[in-house]
Amino acid sequence: MKTLMVAQSGGPTAAINATLAGVIDAAQKSPLIDRIYGSRHGIEGVLHEMFVDLTHFSETEKLKATPAMALGSCRFKLPSEWDNSVYQRIADVFSRYNVGFFVYIGGNDSMDTVKKLAAFFQGKDDAPIIVGAPKTIDNDLPGVDHTPGFGSAARYLTLTMEELCRDLSIYAVKSVTIVEIMGRDAGWLTLAAGLPRFLGGAKPDIIALPEVPFDPEEMLRTIRRLHQTQNGLVIAVSEGIKDKDGNYIGASAQSGAMDQFGHSYLAGAGKYLEHLVKDRIGCKVRSIEISLMQRCSGLLASATDLNESFALGSFAVSLACQGEQGKMAGIRRLQNHPYRTELFPLDVKDCANQTRYVPERWWDLDSPSVRREICDYLLPLIAGEAPRFYRENGLPDYVIFD
């Protein structure tokens, strides 16, 4: 019998712990696994031997409902050279702890780690099986219908935008509110913020995806036109909107800093547009950066998302136990009405370091048929209110590993 080790990496979601719960539950039931370790702070925890013994963990349902990342995270990029001492260190640790299976839960960059580790151990005697379990609120991993974590973030944004639009409609004053939403390259989350409009409402008035070149002058013309017949306007913009030349909007306000994977730290598109509207139109204007809450709000988590994430974690363990080296567990949609999916394995090399964009046919957000397609896609993913656990003082009760 072997040890299963599991770790989390990248940005948190409201559902990534549900995937961890699924991994633990399946590992505890497997006749091939006698011990379960969680690595704190992703692959860095392996390098520094920072482990939590999860072999007899029993609070699976509470962990499933706990947002963020119970094991902690990292953004550590493995080197490309196999003779690097980092790989030998990982191999030594795995050998010492009798690790036969390693499940890494994360997004695009985490799947790069899975790909590199699987390639390093491929063909070696008694090598551990490396498997990926995806998560990302950005929903931009190719090869799958959607990613765990996206449904809960989409639900948060849909409900928040619905409430914001009501709040902003109460004054007979010309105003503009710009809501900045996460999404570096893909606009899936911004589509979710637009769901109140796609379902027949009037707001948000402007929806800007990063896939579509953004023209600030056109935005100003639209604001002036709409202000002729209405007061409070709402604009939903992705943090990653770019102009026709591919430059981030408001890039002059950016620090220029990048993470280990070469991604720019983005923030400030909303603030840039706020100042632009103030200077050029002069009406009441504010920008709202929803920021971290869209990815860590367990209180608005989607039941569909948590249940699928748990099942995907369990499926990742089954792939590992079957010896599926370098595979990632994925979700495939079979139909919308009623909503039905299946889990399937795919090669991690086919999705690591790649991006799935909002399809071009969905860029025309004024098209009734496009709106119907978007609603058919999004509504099942945000369905259901997830169960909650509370302490006696009414605050949420979450799993915290000491």
Image (spheres, rainbow, N blue to C red):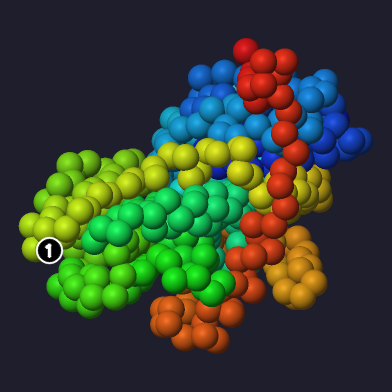
Q: Position of residue 40 (x, y in %)?
A: 57, 24
Q: Is residue 287 above or below residue 363?
A: above
Q: How many marks?
A: 1
Q: Is residue 37 above or below residue 136?
A: above
Q: Is 6 left or right of 273, judged from the image as shown? A: right
Q: Is residue 199 above or below residue 15?
A: below
> Which residue is more in the foreground, 316 or 159?
159
Q: Position of residue 129 (x, y in %)?
A: 69, 43
Mark 1 is on which residue type?
Answer: Ile
Q: Is residue 229 above or below residue 9?
A: below
> Which residue is more in the foreground, 324 or 291?
291
Q: Secondary structure at mark 1?
A: loop
Q: Quadrant of the C terminus?
A: top right
Residue lying at 73% horizontally and 28% vertically, measured from the top left: 389
Q: Is 183 left or right of 368, judged from the image as shown? A: left
Q: Which residue is mark 1?
A: 281
Q: Looking at the image, can residue 70 be seen?
A: yes
Looking at this rendering, what residue extends furthest in the front direction?
172
Q: Looking at the image, can residue 399 be seen?
A: no
> Which residue is more in the foreground, 143 or 153?
153
Q: Is 150 left or right of 289, judged from the image as shown? A: right
> Which residue is more in the foreground, 171 or 342?
171
Corner quadrant of residue 350: bottom right
Q: Is 175 left or right of 376, judged from the image as shown? A: left
Residue lying at 46% horizontally and 33% vertically, measured from the top left: 74
Corner quadrant of residue 37: top right
Q: Quadrant of the N terminus?
A: top right
Q: Position of residue 222 (x, y in %)?
A: 24, 75
Residue lying at 67% horizontally and 15% vertically, measured from the top left: 393
